[in-house]
Amino acid sequence: MAENRKVILETKGLTKHYGGVQALNDADFKMFADEHIAIVGDNGAGKSTFVRNITGVEQRTRGEVFVDGEPVSFASPQEAREHGIETVYQNLALADHLDVPANIFLGREEVKFRLGPLSWLDKKAMAKRSKELLDETGIKIPDLRQPVAGMSGGQRQCVAISRAAGWGSKLIIMDEPTAALGIQETTRVEHIIRGLKERGVPVIIISHNLRQVFNLVDRIVVFRQGRIAGVLDAKTASGNDVVAMITGVDQGVHEDASYI
């Protein structure tokens, strides 16, 4: 029963207005610790606004956010990361001139010792841990010391996901994780996401790819015009159900949609 499952993330009445523009209205959302969820909807439906207000990129107009049952109000993405919530953005937020370990430990560098304003990084420890993280997610990168600028899109995405998996102890959010990738690289990233499921790592995926959504998640949360239009079970819903809810066609069919 859902009542016996641990709730990892919950929002109540989450709302964000930009002046007179209502980007997000009264979003009630609940995610359990053992599931993967997809957030879908047209451009401007409120998906990204929802995530930005959860992760501290923006401050909500009103509403509540709970992590592990505790109310939170993150002032910045760094605060969200400190609470175990990692986000993989479409632009990946990688430093192109740095190598893999430096990107994975960006902002969390391991230090051997400090001498006044100077510090000596423990590059050996960071390289070892980076390889462990890549191995855990099944990623093969021959030379971890090469700048990520020289890597393929799939390899760069894998580095970003490995970083999130390494630090995201509670939740990983992925914004269109395969939008710019080819077929083989998309398959590799999807394999990593399935591996996170097997490891019990909760994941939220924002995606326009319905095939991917049905293959990877347990529930589908549909946003429309700044509101959560409904929640569907990925095992029993169809692509037509999702499209109908996104577009608002045949709204009455799903007016009783609720958490599964």
Image: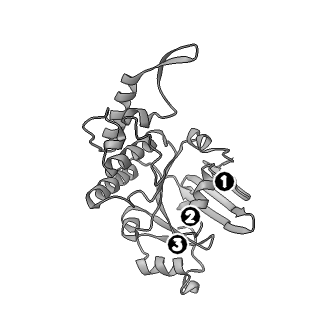
Residue 259 drawn at (x, y percent):
56, 67
Give how far apart the Cα atoms at labels 2 and 1 are: 16 Å
Which label belongs to residue 42? Answer: 3
Q: Is residue 232 above or below residue 154?
A: below
The three-letter amino acid code for the residue at tag 3 is Asp
Residue under label 2, please give it: 47
Q: Residue at x 62, y 74 (%)?
A: 225
Badge 3 element? loop
- Specify the amino acid type for callout 1: Val
In front: 241, or 81?
81
Looking at marks 2 and 1 on the same chain, the residue that comes earlier in the sequence is marked by: 2
In the image, residue 159 lies at what x, y percent? 37, 43
* First along the sequence among labels 3 and 2: 3
Image spot of residue 54 (x, y percent): 61, 53
**22 lies above or below 184:** below
Q: What label does residue 240 carry, if any?
A: none
Q: Residues within 10 Å of mark 3 (few under 14, many from 20)?
A: some
Q: Residue at x 36, y 46 (%)?
A: 156
Which residue corresponds to mark 1? Answer: 65
Element at label 1? strand
Give whichever of discs 1 and 3 has the lower sequence position: 3
Task: Write down the quadrant of residue 26 in the picture.
Answer: bottom right
Residue 62 in the image: state x and y as whole percent: 74, 59
Q: Residue furthest top?
A: 115
Q: CA distance from mark 1 to mark 3?
A: 24 Å
In this picture, is 35 found above or below 68? below
